[in-house]
Amino acid sequence: METKTELDRRDAQYRDGLQVIERAIIAGVAEGGGQLGTHNFRWNHGIAFVPGHPPSAVLLEVLVPGRPAVEETFSREEVEDTWNRLDRFDVRSRVERIIEQLTKP
């Protein structure tokens, strides 16, 4: 069984991974001439995570007025592995696909 410290670390890595993904999308859209903020992102259908129990998969929705939502699902492992930088090829590929969808006319 994980200790409270281990659960707290895992929760922090999970939150950090979500932020790394968001920031990569925001930066990519900005490079393409668009603009996004954290208010454009909804994780897990807007339902808060239970501390110490991140979901096994999480849905990301990027919501831009006047456009269809762009959705992608990430596993817990993918998010946790992305806690300090976007290294995983599979995650980077999906982030790039999201950026492409958000920057096409």
Image (cartoon, rainbow, N blue to C red):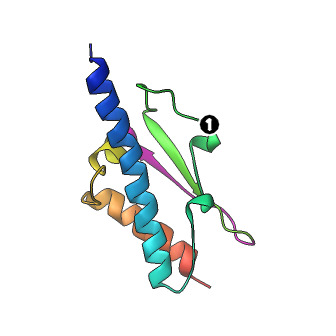
Above or below residue 75? Residue 7 is above
Q: Residue furthest right?
A: 66
Residue in view at x 56 percent, y 60 percent: 38
Q: Which residues are magenta?
A: 66-76
Displayed quadrant of residue 5: top left
Residue at (53% x, 46% y) in the render: 59
Q: Position of residue 94 (x, y in %)?
A: 41, 62
Q: Quadrant of the C terminus?
A: bottom right
User: Is 36 left or right of 95, judged from the image as shown?
Assistant: right
Question: Does 94 appear in magenta?
Answer: no
**Residue 70 appears in the picture as rendered:** no
Where does residue 79 sit, x and y in percent of width and height? 36, 46
For image coordinates 41% across by 44% down, the residue present is 15
**Rendered view: 18 above or below 70:** above
Residue type marked 1: Ile
Q: SS of the residue at dot 1?
A: loop
Residue holding disc 1: 47
Q: Residue 29: x and y, percent?
A: 50, 77
Counting every numbered tag in the picture gives 1
The verdict on residue 70 being magenta is: yes
